Amino acid sequence: MNDLFKLRNNFIIEKIEGKITLFDVEKSTFYSFNKTGTHILGLIKKKYNRSQIVKSIEDKFVVTKEKAVNDLDDFLKTLSKSGITVPLKQKPRKK
């Protein structure tokens, strides 16, 4: 699995009641995300790499590394299949 991702450019992004909602302009489709998904999308926008996102999930949601990795991988696959993210070939953001 790729280490870095970015959101495609054809989305209108709104944060409503603490949760991100995306509108795909090309497909006329809405996507809404729970607290965890909103957190992950925020980190993707900041160009965090996969391991940085895993660590952030562990810390913020107090879960094991294994659960964070599994949940992140599932979420990233869903985003990719939906065409929400694309692989990014840049250096990760430094902390």
Image (cartoon, rainbow, N blue to C red):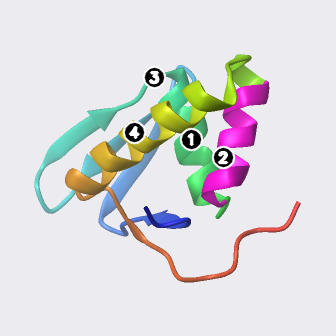
Among the two numbered marks 1 and 4 on one chain, the one whose residue lies closer to the N terminus: 1
Q: Which mark is residue 21?
A: none
Q: Are marks 3 and 1 in contact (CB under 8 Å)?
A: no
Among the two numbered marks 3 and 1 on one chain, the one whose residue lies closer to the N terminus: 3
Of the 4 image quadrants, the one containing the N terminus is bottom left
Q: Are marks 1 and 2 in contact (CB under 8 Å)?
A: yes
Query: Residue visible at 48% across and 65% down?
Result: 6
Among the two numbered marks 4 and 2 on one chain, the one whose residue lies closer to the N terminus: 2
Of circles 1 and 4, the one toward us is: 4
Q: What residue occupies the far front of the structure in this picture?
A: 66
Question: In the rendered image, which quarter is residue 93 located in?
Answer: bottom right
The kind of residue on which mark 2 rests is Ile
Q: Which mark is residue 53?
A: 2
Q: Are marks 1 and 4 in contact (CB under 8 Å)?
A: yes
Q: Position of residue 89 (x, y in %)?
A: 53, 82
Residue 23, visible in the rendered structure: yes
Q: Is residue 88 left or right of residue 45?
A: left
Counting other residues with Cα less than 10 Å from the Cα at mark 4, is it few (<14), some (14-19), or many (20 or more)?
some
Q: Is residue 12 magenta?
A: no
Q: Position of residue 61 (x, y in %)?
A: 69, 19
The kind of residue on which mark 3 rests is Asn
Question: In the rendered image, which quarter is residue 50 located in?
Answer: bottom right
Q: Give the labeled residue for mark 3.
A: 34
The kind of residue on which mark 4 rests is Phe
Q: Main secondary structure of the magenta part?
A: helix
The kind of residue on which mark 1 rests is Ile
Q: Is residue 84 left or right of residue 64?
A: left
52 above or below 59?
A: below
